[in-house]
Image (tube, coloured by chain):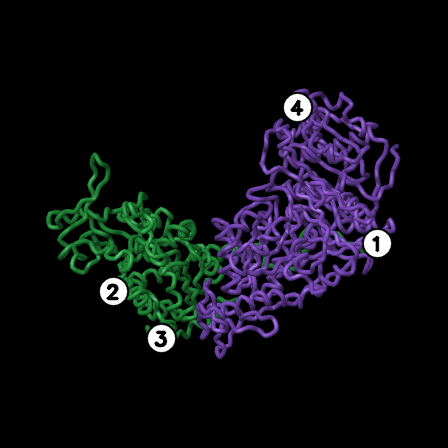
Amino acid sequence: MSNHVEIKNAVIRFAGDSGDGIQITGSMFTHESAILGHDISTMPDFPAEIRAPAGTLAGVSSFQLNFSSYEIDTPGDQPAVLVALNPAALRANIMDLAPGGAIILNSDAFTKSEWQKAGYASDPLADHSLSGFKIYPIPVSSLTLAAVENTGISRKQAVQCKNMFTLGVITWLYDRSIEPIKRYIDKRYSAIRPEMAEANKLALQAGYNYADTVELFTGKYQITAAKLPPGVYRRVTGNEATALGMLTASELCGRPLFYASYPITPASDILHELSKLRHFGVITMQAEDEIAAMGMAIGAAYGGSLGLTGTSGPGMALKSEAIGLAVMTELPVVIINVQRGGPSTGLPTKTEQADLLQAMFGRNGESPVAIVAPATPADCFHMAIEAFRIAVRYMIPVVYLSDGYLANGSEPWRIPGPEELPSMRVKFHRDRDMPLPYVRDPQTLSRPWIVPGTPGLEHRIGGLEKQDGTGDVSYNSRNHEIMVGYRAEKVRRIAEVIPPLTVSGPETGDLLILGWGSTYGAIRHAAENARNQGLSVASAHLKYLNPWPANTGEVLGRYKHVLLPELNSGQLRMLLRAEYLVDIIGMNKIMGKPFLMTEIEEKIQTILGGVRPLKTAAVTC
Amino acid sequence: MLMNEQATRNEHVQQYTRKDFISPEAVRWCPGCGDYSILAQMQRVMPTVCAELNLPRENIVFISGIGCSSRFPYYMNTYGFHTIHGRAPTIATGLAVSRPDLQVWVITGDGDGLSIGANHLLHCLRRNIDIKIILFNNRIYGLTKGQYSPTSEKGKKTKSSPMGTMEAPVNPLYTAMVAEATFVARAIATDSDRLREILLRAARHRGAAFVEVLQNCNVFNDGAFDSFAEKAVMEERTLILKDGNPLIFGKNGDKVLKMRGGSHGLEFEVAPTAETPADKLVLHNEKSPRNYLARLLTTLDEATLPVPIGVFQAIDRPHYGAQLQDQIAMARKRNGPGKLFEHLHNADTWSVT
């Protein structure tokens, strides 16, 4: 009989070849964790190559899950358990494993040729290089083949079931039932590939039984359910939540959603999600290129739909001229940029926050747009609605800056009720006595949305400078300055309808850690940990980046130091310093990976320990 | 939503005249520009288009890119959108697909449509988006003051090619054909009656209509089409395509265009009509779905053979917007109309109390 050890959270990383089904294994275990009431946060990591040569470092795919009995917002700094299906998966991930952590590995894969392929000079299982960890070698391949041998599937297919075997082992280790996973397999696969569904269930059961029988592990771990606010929950990735939020915005506005996009990592899942929504009247078009996608969204917005396009950095570069057209014609379009490592093609599957200045300034002329950025995967739902709320109210293009980490990461999302959503019905201008397309609303400075088909209001718009009021072409120099001023002031006034910047922790004090985008979880928890150690540290998160909440400058002024961790070289820091003349300390990481909590905690110690910030390349700036 | 409102209103479409389509904006093309004629014919044909298609003026939108021709929407008293260089087909696509109640025209030029925007033109045609594309071809860049265009003949000397261009020109109609365009036509700006007729045919077409209008730039490329478009030679040098008719042209139809197979492959030649038996004449069939003849007719050597004018191809194929509406109807039949909160909950959910 095994011992039961109660723990508060667990960080597990599954790793294998990109063809090993690592992402699906991680998803299934995550799904079960969420259903059991844990708070969860996940981080998938996969190569840009679809199938790099098997067994090589280039082909390693991984999935990290943090599940807990308390509220979490990060996938965890260091996994305590690493599941490695081959030597390459071990070698690519071992440096992240917590000291003394557990490695569950497929011993069948540790042949000489395999460890050589992974770049090991000697067998890592024999050379004591893993002596600081607990090793659990299991002949996963051969046990899986034996478990499924009577199902009639091919050997190749049988080998593919080994991820389910390891899932069975892990499920046992955390003292869970495998029944929900079996049901999940049935639901997803039994109709399409019944024989594979059966084999996967057999492999899962075999893994579970193996762990139960063989006295490999000294005990099981138990984690109680987290105390999340009451409500109905589901698990969402950032891209899923973005798609759901955009759909919701369309329903709230009473206008159809039109999404045009050119496939690009890591934004394509938004196109896939929205393409399933024909019954809502959602129109999706796979455009011939990024420029066309932007043009189509503008055309749809001109016609009265919610025009939306989505891309990543390189696509953003291509769209910039057309975004300028939307600025000039003052049409409500939303541009999703799921940021990835740049410049150029960069690191397609890795995360980064380096497109902020591109969103702010990446167009010719004085060309301001509004910018919002979600903080967590679930927050993508809320910020997607915000993007359109601003776009239609101010008749302005809005850039929605997500990133690869948010897009593919997941967490529980409490599904809101109708009463929790903003009211944002839109009205088109139909008044024939007021046929001027550039007469502005005195409060928002927005121009009227006049759609073709409205009798008596036929007019012409375009990319040439507009005459104030009439919208006719105007080359008048004074008028140009007035119009540039209107377009800038319109963005500034958005601050009137966005929530103020709020702070967690002390209202004044020694240090404020400010963040934006996906750094939210690491910052919040690092600040919390510092407070628990008696330090005066607060955190705040900017979800509106242009304009900033009206109280931003005031908040920054209340602390002795302000630290701004960013996954770039200091883009928001540059903007805030220019605006508020506050000497913000930068913390910058450009490694295609999110911040670890410990990195931020170390930085807090450096600042509050009276030591001047060190100038090391990776972390400090 | 909008479609239903429109359907009701369309029952009372008023009678328009040419004046209803003249915008208050002063026309600013160079005096003598071929664009004036195209504008005039468009304004003249619009009342017929509206009456025939039961279309109110407010449901007509002209969308253009950049270039001399792209100023066109400012002069039409309809909805208009002067967009950015080469991208008009994309904006028109977004509009036409999301607003099937509108009639969307794209006005473009040889540089706008076939150089910077060639990609969009190709995809717009193959998707068969329900828009009417009028490409003004003057074989020169006018707005930037006289550089060669993608349709300029090889060897053309311009400001940017003082020793002559080294590029083969692109053939607009052949390009449209290989892009699977469903409606392909050519007109001459000064040949006003026929131009009007072709614009009307384009307006009637459901799907992507592509019309090349040969248009003289009297400032930077004067006389580009004189060798066949001048009144005096037009009858001898152009072949007016008529559906169901043989390829005859010239004074009293005395010449016929024939195909001849031989050691050089397939060739066209001109022969006297009188010497050709009626049963040997090939007939033009603009509705043939595999219209090899129409494709070949877009490639005739302008120097040695007549220049075909008229509708090369007009075939029925479901347009993108219609197929999309079918998919929406099918999805609603299958899943019921979308219900937001049901959809948000349509996943593996759990309750926390």
Q: Residues within 10 Å of mark 2 (few under 14, many from 20)?
A: few
Q: Are marks 4 and 1 on the same chain?
A: yes
The tag on residue B282 is none
Q: Earlier in the sequence, mark 4 or mark 1?
A: 4
Residue A332 at x, y = what percent? 55, 63
Pointer 4: residues within 10 angstroms few (<14), some, or many (20+)? Answer: some
* Residue picked out by circle 1: A536
Which amino acid is tagged 1?
Answer: Ser
Badges 4 and 3: C-beta atoms under 8 Å apart? no
Three-letter residue code for mark 2: Asp
The N terminus of chain A, quarter of image: top right
Q: To which residue does mark 2 refer?
A: B193
Q: Which residue is mark 4?
A: A114
Residue at the image position 63 percent from the left and 55 percent from the top: A244
Question: Which residue is most to the bottom?
Answer: A433
Q: Colour of chain A?
A: purple
Q: Residue at x 74, y 29 (%)?
A: A105
Q: Position of residue B157 (x, y in %)?
A: 28, 49
Does label 3 lie on the same chain as label 2?
yes
- Between circles 4 and 3, the one closer to the viewer is 4
Q: Nearer the viewer, residue A502 or A195?
A: A502
Q: Which residue is mark 3?
A: B15
Are there few (<14), some (14-19), or many (20+) residues within 10 Å of tag 1?
many
